[in-house]
């Protein structure tokens, strides 16, 4: 039987989703030698069983999911949705078929299942499944991991060799450039997962397109008639593959312009056309005038980037030597499609978090209004981002990544307040509610990041601390808003205008204090003040534009550095075994440009084929030393002093130095000699850093983790996550532990082993570092085991001694210890001893009596200062008694005594006492305003009003603020008493005169 006539087309066997464009009654098998990828071998996971079945020509296999390759002698996997596999004819025989022993999961459309099926789909097509990289990227051009391709950037640039021909990942990503759209649209998020398959010079368009279609229509079972495709307007090749080979109708393929479908990494660098898959929620509208940008109808769920060009400086395109594939499928978007919910938030990836927030807010998501739904979506989204950021080591702060997580926490807190969540939402008004919701995020994290649950205590504690701190900030914002509204009302009254709060002030409240513009608007309206929303929107747009420009582009450039990577091999590092070696000069860079030779006096960057110099990494700074170029028998032709060594383009060591003598040329042999004394100081401090981390975990708890480090010649610095300052007793205990370990004279052990083996052995990985499959493990037996590529002592006794110099907070939840060890420790102790001996000589006491002598001196100083303050206050009261008779009456119905006076150089505290004395002396009703210049460039002001004046609607706090502004300052206080300051003494007389005239004007009106 040569072929088989089928009564219906292939699509009818699997839900109308055609993989091959076969017409009705097509002959099986097809005439062409079709193969998705002939060289790809399926990777069978453990648990597969082999069964033998009999197959008769023309070999039609009914199998269940995802693997089909070659026709003869091929093993097949069975897993989910039914489809027919077409094989070339071969003689009737018994053929082996491999079938996975697992239950049918074709109906499982959970987010975890979608993720797993994507990875399995591409793993079965030869892709290596790699873990998600951290949200903190090893890339200075971006703040956070914003795309799945980011971890492969060096490979795409050709800076590092590929480890595998193709890979697949489920990458955690953060984007905050569209944070204002979160909760408002169906698809915008700050945290999302990007499922991707990547080819590094392996397969290209044809395979990428076919697999994307097969994944969508067969694996996930999406109806083919609901899928649309976009291609770049000039990409005829992609158009032909989609139409001619996959079978997508012409009317479902849209050609789009450069803005939509041509990916670029920057002004220059790798680029190429894109092709995107869209799902149609409203197919009944037909294809006429269909707009893929219509979010109500379409959602883009899969983007394929064909990285095939390099854009040059002049804008021209040249083909890349290695063509790559970079794709991204949005997990949340696919979950929305398969779970048939109206938006991404109602998928099982986010909705359980929303339900928890609804419980605390005492509302039902399904029955509440759209505004409350939006607020619940914001909390559901933001808590995911916050939890994974903190888990990856980002702590709230006012700079960089820390500011991103702080803003998200504040936005979640203020959104919770809008929902009516008070305190922890469970009756404790002084508690925090975010940790309760975060527990649900952590519960859902198992298949996203297995480390999150282990880090849960730290995550929840950080959230609680930051939320409670922000509530205080929010309350300060409320006070500032009160002052702003008072100023707006006063200004409107004086200028006869409608009260309006500027957009700039509203934005200040929003951006600095996290005060929602909705609350600002509501409070303002209660007092009859409007908000200039147009200028507020301008401020918001400016911030959004800056955010997008700074954080939403992954920059790839192929320039001089790219060429250098091809011309210069990786540097062979010899520094673990020796401090000197013969090497060849591979390249010289002068001001960033490649040169053949460099003469005396020039600063130069030198690349050697091998080196004993350690390049800065893992917190340890680069070595110092010299290069000696020789000619013949010990004839030196050049001496180069090396001041720093850095790694570039993967593993190329760049030696930075100055030509001290002679001329250095490319190709010359040099003697590279490391400064042994400085290397020893670095080794001592690096091993001491490992001991410090071990001691911290032992003294304050295992949950503490490294947040950064510096290993220098003169000191070490260690940053760690902890929520409070260390006690003096804890610092003493840490020092004693480390010095005891030093005294134990323990031999260090260094091994190279697979990364997984090292982790299983308990080795600690350094935060922010990337590791290969083989890692170096440095162990102080019984004390510490860490993954580390740095240089270390052979025996702990080489450290000699350890001393903590300082312990301080550098950000919320991050502490820093600076310490010295070895030779630096001895220098520190000697310097301290010298200063102590000098102090003993000055105070004429023994060393053990210095503390008590200093305490006595401080007490004497405090007593003298108190006496001086008392004398100043008496002098101020004496001046006040003299000027009291200068008070003058204002008003006819009620005579109010008013006094406005300059009090020379009276200090602020004494000025306050004088004002209190005067209002008591003048009696109610009275109004007193005093000003003084207590020092150079300083102004003090005080306003004191009696109850009868306050009852007239005149408040001291609101009155003194505008007066202080004339002196370049500000202030405020209670209705009856307020203080202010300034820095323009030359304007004080004008300010007092204004205070006098305004009091007369206001009181005359109110008391007449």
Image (cartoon, rainbow, N blue to C red):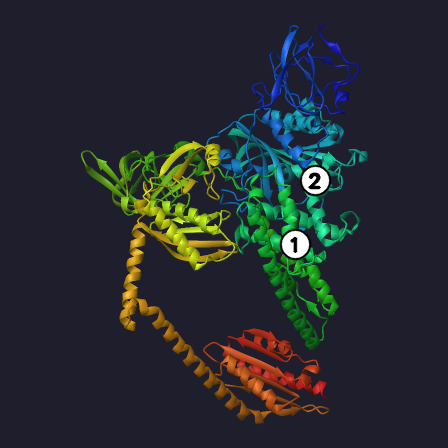
Q: Would you say the residues marked 1 and 2 are in contact, meaning their CB atoms lie under 8 Å apart?
A: no
Badge 1, how many Cα within 10 Å: few under 14, some, many 20+? many
Q: In the rendered image, is residue 183 in sight?
A: no
Residue at 66% x, 21% y: name it: 78
525 w.r.t. 692: above or below: below
Q: Quadrant of residue 32?
A: top right
Is residue 724 shown above or below 965?
A: above
> Which image quarter is the C terminus in?
bottom right
The reply to whether residue 433 is in sight is yes
Q: Secondary structure at mark 2?
A: loop
What is the x, y in percent for residue 497? 72, 73
- Tell which residue pokes out farthest to the left in this image: 633
Judge by depth and name the residue closer to the eye, 856 or 894: 856
Label located before the other in sequence (1 or 2): 2
Residue 743 vs residue 992, the one in the foreground: 743
Disc sitting over residue 348 in the figure: 2
Residue 210, position in %: x, y? 65, 25
- Asked if residue 683 lies left or right of residue 54, the reply is left
Identify the residue under disc 1: 433
Front tag of 1 and 2: 1
In this rendering, the answer to whether 715 lies above or below 20 is: below
| Image mark count | 2
Tell me if 125 is positioned left or right of 840 in this view: right
Q: CA distance from mark 1 to mark 2?
A: 22 Å
Most distant residue in the right direction:
284
Q: Residue 331 appears at what percent x and percent y?
A: 65, 37
Q: Position of residue 733 (x, y in %)?
A: 41, 54
Q: Which is nearer the eye, 146 or 388?
A: 388
The quadrant in which residue 304 appears is top right
Q: Residues within 10 Å of mark 2 (few under 14, many from 20)?
A: some
């Amino acid at each position: 039987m040569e072929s088989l006539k089928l009564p219906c087309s292939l699509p009818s066997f699997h839900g109308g989703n055609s993989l091959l464009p076969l017409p009705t009654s097509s002959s099986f098998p097809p005439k062409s030698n079709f193969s998705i990828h002939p060289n790809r071998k399926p990777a069978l996971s453990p648990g597969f069983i082999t069964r033998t079945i009999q197959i008769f020509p023309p070999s039609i296999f009914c199998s269940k999911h995802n693997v089909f390759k070659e026709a003869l002698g091929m093993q097949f996997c069975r897993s989910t949705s039914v489809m027919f596999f077409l094989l070339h004819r071969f003689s009737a025989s018994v053929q082996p078929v491999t079938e996975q022993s697992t239950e049918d999961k074709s109906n499982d459309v959970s987010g975890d299942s979608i993720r797993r099926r994507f990875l399995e789909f591409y793993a079965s097509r030869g892709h290596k499944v790699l873990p998600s990289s951290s949200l903190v990227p090893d890339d200075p051009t971006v703040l956070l991991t914003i795309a799945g391709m980011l971890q492969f950037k060096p490979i795409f640039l050709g800076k590092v060799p590929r480890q595998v021909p193709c890979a697949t990942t489920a990458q955690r990503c953060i984007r905050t450039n569209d944070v204002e759209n979160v909760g408002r649209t169906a698809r915008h998020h700050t945290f999302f997962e990007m499922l991707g398959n990547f080819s590094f010079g392996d397969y290209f368009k044809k395979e990428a397109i076919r697999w994307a279609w097969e994944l969508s229509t067969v694996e996930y079972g999406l109806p083919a008639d609901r899928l649309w495709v976009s291609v770049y307007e000039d990409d005829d090749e992609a158009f032909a593959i989609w139409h001619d080979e996959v079978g997508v109708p012409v009317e479902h393929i849209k050609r789009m312009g450069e803005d939509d479908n041509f990916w670029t990494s920057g002004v220059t660098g790798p680029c190429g056309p894109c092709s995107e898959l869209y799902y149609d929620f409203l197919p009944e509208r037909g294809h006429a005038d269909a707009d893929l940008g219509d979010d109500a109808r379409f959602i883009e769920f899969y983007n394929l980037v064909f990285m095939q060009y390099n854009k040059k400086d002049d804008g021209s395109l040249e083909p890349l030597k290695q063509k790559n594939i970079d794709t991204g499928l949005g997990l949340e978007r696919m979950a929305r499609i398969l779970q048939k919910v109206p938006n991404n938030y109602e998928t099982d990836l986010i909705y359980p978090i929303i339900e928890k927030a609804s419980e605390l807010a005492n509302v039902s998501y399904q029955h509440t209004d759209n505004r409350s739904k939006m607020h619940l979506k914001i909390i559901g989204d933001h808590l995911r981002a916050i939890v994974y950021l903190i888990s990856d080591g980002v702590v709230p702060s006012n700079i960089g990544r820390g500011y991103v997580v702080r803003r998200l926490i504040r936005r979640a807190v203020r959104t919770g307040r809008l929902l009516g969540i008070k305190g922890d939402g469970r009756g404790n008004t002084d508690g925090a509610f975010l940790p309760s919701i975060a527990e649900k995020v952590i519960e859902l994290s198992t298949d996203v990041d297995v480390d999150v649950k282990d880090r849960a205590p730290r995550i929840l504690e950080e959230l609680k601390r930051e939320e409670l701190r922000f509530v205080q900030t929010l309350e300060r914002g409320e006070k500032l808003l009160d002052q702003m509204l008072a100023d707006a009302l006063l200004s409107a009254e004086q200028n006869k205008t409608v009260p309006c709060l500027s957009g700039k002030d509203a934005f200040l409240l929003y951006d600095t204090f996290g005060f929602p513009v909705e609350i600002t608007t509501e409070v303002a309206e209660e007092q009859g003040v409007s908000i200039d929303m147009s200028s507020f929107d301008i401020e918001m747009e400016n911030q959004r534009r800056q955010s997008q420009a700074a954080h939403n582009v992954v920059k790839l450039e192929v320039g001089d550095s790219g060429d250098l990577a091809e011309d210069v091999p990786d540097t062979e590092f010899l520094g673990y075994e020796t401090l000197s070696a013969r090497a060849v000069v591979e390249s010289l860079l002068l001001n960033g440009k490649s040169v053949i030779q460099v003469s005396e006096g020039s600063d130069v960057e030198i690349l050697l084929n091998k080196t004993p110099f350690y390049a800065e990494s893992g917190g340890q700074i680069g070595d110092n030393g010299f290069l000696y170029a020789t000619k013949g028998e010990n004839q030196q032709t050049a001496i180069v002093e090396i001041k720093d060594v850095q790694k570039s383009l993967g593993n190329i060591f760049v030696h930075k130095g100055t030509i001290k003598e002679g001329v250095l040329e490319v190709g010359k042999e040099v003697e590279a000699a490391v400064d042994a004394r400085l290397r020893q100081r670095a080794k001592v401090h690096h091993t001491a850093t490992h001991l410090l981390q071990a001691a911290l975990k032992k003294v304050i708890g295992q949950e503490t983790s490294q947040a950064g480090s510096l290993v220098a010649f003169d000191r070490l610095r260690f940053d760690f996550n902890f929520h409070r300052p260390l006690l003096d007793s804890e610092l003493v205990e840490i020092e004693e532990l480390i010095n005891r370990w030093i005294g134990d004279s323990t031999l260090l052990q260094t091994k190279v082993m697979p990364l997984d083996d090292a982790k299983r052995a308990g080795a600690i990985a350094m935060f922010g570092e990337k590791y290969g499959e083989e890692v170096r493990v440095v162990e102080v037996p019984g004390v510490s085991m860490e993954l580390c590529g740095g240089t270390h002592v052979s025996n702990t006794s080489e450290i000699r001694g350890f001393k903590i110099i300082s312990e301080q907070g550098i950000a919320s939840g991050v502490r820093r210890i600076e310490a010295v060890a070895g030779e630096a420790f001895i220098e520190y102790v000697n310097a301290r001893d010298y200063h102590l001996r000098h102090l003993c000589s000055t105070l004429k006491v023994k060393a053990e009596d210095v503390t008590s002598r200093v305490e006595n001196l401080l007490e004497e100083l405090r007593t003298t200062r108190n006496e001086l303050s008392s004398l100043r206050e008496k002098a101020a009261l004496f001046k006040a008694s003299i000027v009291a008779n200068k008070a003058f009456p204002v008003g006819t119905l009620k005579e109010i005594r008013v006094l406005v006076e300059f009090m020379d150089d009276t200090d602020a505290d004494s000025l306050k006492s004088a004002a209190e004395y005067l209002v008591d002396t003048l009696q109610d009703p009275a109004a007193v305003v005093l000003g003084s210049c207590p020092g150079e460039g300083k102004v003090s002001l005080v306003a004191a009003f009696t109850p009868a004046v306050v009852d007239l609607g005149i408040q001291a706090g609101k009155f003194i603020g505008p007066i202080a502004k004339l002196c370049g300052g500000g202030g405020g206080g209670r209705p009856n008493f307020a203080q202010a300051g300034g820095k323009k003494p030359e304007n004080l007389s004008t300010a007092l005169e204004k205070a006098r005239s305004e009091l007369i004007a206001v009181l005359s009106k109110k008391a007449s």
